[in-house]
C-alpha cells in the first residue's frame, strides 16, 4: 500500500490530549446539576486519532508530537502503541504537562462541546521533528497548531515528495501559508465560515483549489461533504445513516480514512465516500478512539448504503 521507497503510509504532526468524555441527558444550563449517563477517558487530538484510524484499517503510520512525563502522557502513548501507531517520534518532556480535553456530549443530539486545557503544555519545536520519520512517509497529515514545528515537517515532507493533508479546525497563525503548501486541505464547514465568511462549502472547495490545492474537501457533519479537484466539478456526498451517540472525533476519523484510501490508490470520489462511511460509523460510540471502525465494518456500510454516492453540482 505504501508508495515505493516509503516505509510509512502517513506521518502525522499535531497536538494530542487525553479526552475526558461525559455523555449527558442534555446540555446543562447555568447553575444546573446533572447525573451523567456514561464517562470515558481515552486519547484524543485530531492528528493522533486520524493516525489511529489508519492503523486500525491496516496502514503503517507514525506520530510526531509532545507529551509530558505524567500519567496522561503515558496513557496516550500506550493507547497509540496498542493500536499500532509508531510513537518513536514522540518527545516526552519532563517539564511539560500533557494536554487534557473535557468534552460534554448531548445524548439527544450526539453533539459535543469541547474545552481544551493546554496550560503548562509545551509546544513541539522544529528541531524536535524527526526528518527520517517524515521523509519515510508517502503522506504528511498536520493540524498546523504548533506552527513552526508543523511548517518544518511540511518542508521536510515536500522535500521528499510526500503529499500534504491539512486538517484545519480554526483559523490560526500562518493559515494562508499552510493552505498554499497543502495538496489536500480537508477542513470543516466551521473553518470555512470563519475563514471565508458567507461562502458556501462548494464555493470554498473552489477557493482552496484556486489557492493551489490539488483537491479539497469540506466536511459538513450530518450534511455530508463537498469536494472537488483541479479541472473538475464540485461534488456533494450525503451523509451515511447511523444511530449516532457522539460526534467527537468524527472529523478526525474522516481524515484518517481519507488518507488510507488515497494511499491505497483510490480516486478522490472513492476516498471521500470511504471516509464518510468511516466517520459515520465512529459516531456509534462515545469518544473518538472507541468508535474507530474496522475495515470490514466500513466495507459493509458502503455495500449496505450503495445509494449514498457523490452528486455532481451545477
Image: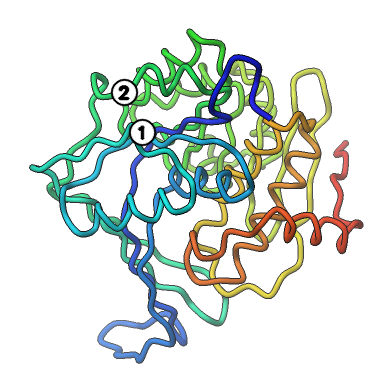
Residues under numbered marks 2 and 1 in contact, where contact means CB atoms less than 8 Å apart: yes
Q: Residues within 10 Å of mark 2 (few under 14, many from 20)?
A: many
Q: Which residue is mark 2?
A: 129
Q: How many angstroms separate mark 2 from mark 1 (CA)?
A: 7 Å
Residue pointed to by mark 1: 64
Residue at x 37% of width, y 39% of height: 87
Q: Residue at the location (42% across, 13% down)?
A: 155
Residue 215 found in image quarter = top right
Q: Coloured how?
A: rainbow
Q: Is residue 275 above or below residue 59?
A: below
**Furthest residue to the top?**
159
**What percent of the width, then of the height, locates residue 112?**
46, 67
309 lies left or right of 256: right
Whichever of labels 2 and 1 marks the residue nearer the N terminus, that label is 1
Please give left or right for residue 9 compared with residue 69 in the image.
right
What is the quadrant of the C terminus in the image?
Answer: top right
SS state under label 2: loop
Say whether residue 275 is left or right of residue 251: right
Q: Identify the secondary structure beneath mark 1.
A: strand
Where residue 165 appears, as percent x and y from the top left, is 55, 29
Residue 270's spot in the image, x, y percent? Answer: 80, 39
Q: Which mark is residue 162?
A: none
Q: Is residue 129 left or right of residue 1?
A: left
Amino acid at each position: 500500500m505504501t508508495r515505493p521507497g516509503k516505509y510509512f503510509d502517513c506521518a502525522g504532526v499535531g497536538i494530542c490530549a487525553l479526552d475526558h468524555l461525559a455523555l449527558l441527558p442534555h446540555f446543562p444550563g447555568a447553575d444546573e446539576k446533572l447525573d451523567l449517563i456514561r464517562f470515558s477517558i481515552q486519547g484524543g487530538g485530531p492528528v493522533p486519532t486520524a493516525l489511529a484510524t489508519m492503523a486500525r484499517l491496516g496502514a503503517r503510520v507514525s506520530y510526531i508530537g509532545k507529551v509530558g512525563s505524567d500519567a496522561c502522557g503515558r496513557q496516550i502513548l500506550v493507547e497509540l502503541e496498542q493500536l499500532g501507531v509508531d510513537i518513536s517520534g514522540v518527545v516526552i518532556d519532563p517539564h511539560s504537562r500533557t494536554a487534557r480535553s473535557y468534552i460534554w456530549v448531548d445524548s439527544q443530539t450526539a453533539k459535543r462541546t469541547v474545552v481544551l486545557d493546554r496550560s503548562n503544555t509545551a509546544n513541539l519545536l522544529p528541531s524536535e521533528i524527526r526528518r527520517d520519520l517524515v521523509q519515510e512517509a508517502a503522506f504528511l497529515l498536520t493540524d498546523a497548531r504548533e506552527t513552526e514545528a508543523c511548517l518544518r515537517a511540511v518542508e521536510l515532507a515536500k522535500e521528499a515528495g510526500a503529499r500534504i493533508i491539512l486538517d484545519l479546525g480554526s483559523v490560526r497563525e500562518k493559515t494562508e501559508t499552510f493552505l498554499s503548501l497543502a495538496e489536500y486541505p480537508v477542513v470543516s464547514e466551521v473553518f470555512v465560515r470563519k475563514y471565508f465568511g458567507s461562502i458556501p462549502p462548494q464555493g470554498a472547495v473552489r477557493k482552496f483549489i484556486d489557492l493551489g490545492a490539488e483537491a479539497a474537501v469540506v466536511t459538513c457533519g450530518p450534511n455530508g461533504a463537498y469536494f472537488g479537484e483541479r479541472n473538475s466539478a464540485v461534488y456533494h456526498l450525503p451523509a451515511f445513516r447511523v444511530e449516532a451517540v457522539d460526534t467527537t472525533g468524527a472529523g478526525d476519523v474522516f481524515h484518517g480514512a481519507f488518507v488510507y484510501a488515497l494511499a491505497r490508490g483510490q480516486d478522490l470520489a472513492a476516498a471521500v465516500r470511504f471516509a464518510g462511511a468511516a466517520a459515520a460509523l465512529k459516531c456509534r460510540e462515545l469518544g473518538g478512539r472507541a468508535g474507530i471502525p474496522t475495515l470490514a465494518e466500513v466495507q459493509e456500510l458502503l455495500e449496505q448504503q450503495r445509494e449514498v454516492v457523490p452528486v455532481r453540482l451545477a
